[in-house]
Image (cartoon, coloured by chain):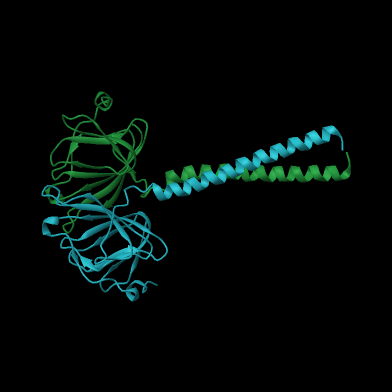
Chain colours: A green, B cyan
């Protein structure tokens, strides 16, 4: 092998190493991208909801507290897969707006309905209901409680596994 | 140069070509990712707002229409860069929730304030105000109008370029 051949092979090795480096850099950027999806939620994760009102991990981030001007409560809940609220009701109803993920919602006596990104769900005043993530996907859900002069929420019993798994 | 050297170089060239291919594949996936951000807005784009109420292109997508149960209007506006609403006021006020982008908001007589993803802005009842995108970024903005039994919106004059460009 001649000296020039060695130089050629060295150059090729350097080019190969560089190309592999760029390639791995691409992979690491993609990994960062995937992590970003977790960290670039619209709102901070918030505080974990208490075990007496939630099954599994649900995190609440308050956006608007009630006052006598707007009479409105707004917040965001991140439900981890399988997590759900207890049964509960709102004296003036509630509006849910799904910003990411897939979830379940059920009004008492009716079948579970699926909720996806962009969906809007109304829970009528004083109707028992629950909402949460689906078993395999988390749910990012904004809630709006209007007319809070009538009250905000009344918490009831947990949603059993049998009730949660009744979704067909 | 020996035959085995040629084989070695051929193998290196093949490895190099493969590495470059993987690398370019990484780039093309990143490009698709960037396009996804454009197409994966939470809500559909909606209908363009009328020129008598908006400067530039603003698209409104209604989420909740008013009724006598919730007394609430909810919707999403996508403002293109530079676009903004006219001055206007709400008899019962308005709550803005920014889901993406960068925008401006101003209450009459106060300086322009910047709004970013995750921000919540309250516009008090009967206070003249406007909102829109910043000059270089679009704005995705949800709005909540509570207590609609008092009325929804009163449209006023356009925001002039001088008013819009007054942001420091």
Above or below, A87 against A99 in this view is: above
Front residue (pair B70, B64): B64
Left or right of A18, for residue B42: left
Residue B167, how many percent across, how many down?
37, 71
Residue B138, how many percent across, how many down?
38, 59
Which residue appears at 37% of the width and 34% of the height?
A137
Which residue appears at 79% of the width and 44% of the height?
A10
Residue A138, how many percent across, how many down?
36, 37
Front residue (pair B37, B110): B37
Above or below, A128 against A146 in this view is: above
Mark yes or no: residue A152 visible.
Answer: yes
Left or right of B100, for residue B130: left
Q: Residue A3 sits in which quadrant?
A: top right
The C terminus of chain B is located in which quarter?
bottom left
The N terminus of chain B is located in which quarter?
top right
Which residue appears at 19% of the width and 44% of the height?
A94
Front residue (pair B166, A72): B166
Residue extending farthest top: A162
Residue extending farthest bottom: B162
Mark yes or no: residue A51 visible.
Answer: no
Residue B157, how many percent across, how many down?
23, 72
């Amino acid at each position: 092998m001649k000296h020039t051949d060695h130089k050629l092979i060295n150059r090729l090795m350097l080019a190969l190493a560089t190309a592999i480096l760029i390639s791995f850099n691409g992979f690491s950027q993609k990994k960062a991208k995937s992590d970003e999806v977790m960290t670039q939620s619209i709102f901070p994760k918030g505080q974990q909801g208490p075990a007496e009102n939630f099954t599994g991990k649900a995190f609440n981030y308050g956006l608007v507290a009630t006052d006598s001007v707007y009479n409105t409560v707004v917040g965001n809940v991140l439900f981890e897969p399988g997590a759900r609220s207890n049964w509960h009701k709102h004296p003036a109803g509630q509006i849910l707006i799904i910003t990411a993920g897939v979830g379940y919602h059920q009004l008492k006596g009716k079948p579970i309905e699926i909720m996806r990104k962009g969906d809007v769900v109304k829970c009528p005043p004083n109707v028992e209901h629950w909402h949460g993530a689906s078993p395999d996907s988390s749910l990012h859900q904004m809630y709006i409680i209007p007319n809070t002069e009538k009250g905000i929420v009344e918490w009831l019993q947990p949603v059993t596994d049998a009730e949660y798994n009744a979704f067909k």
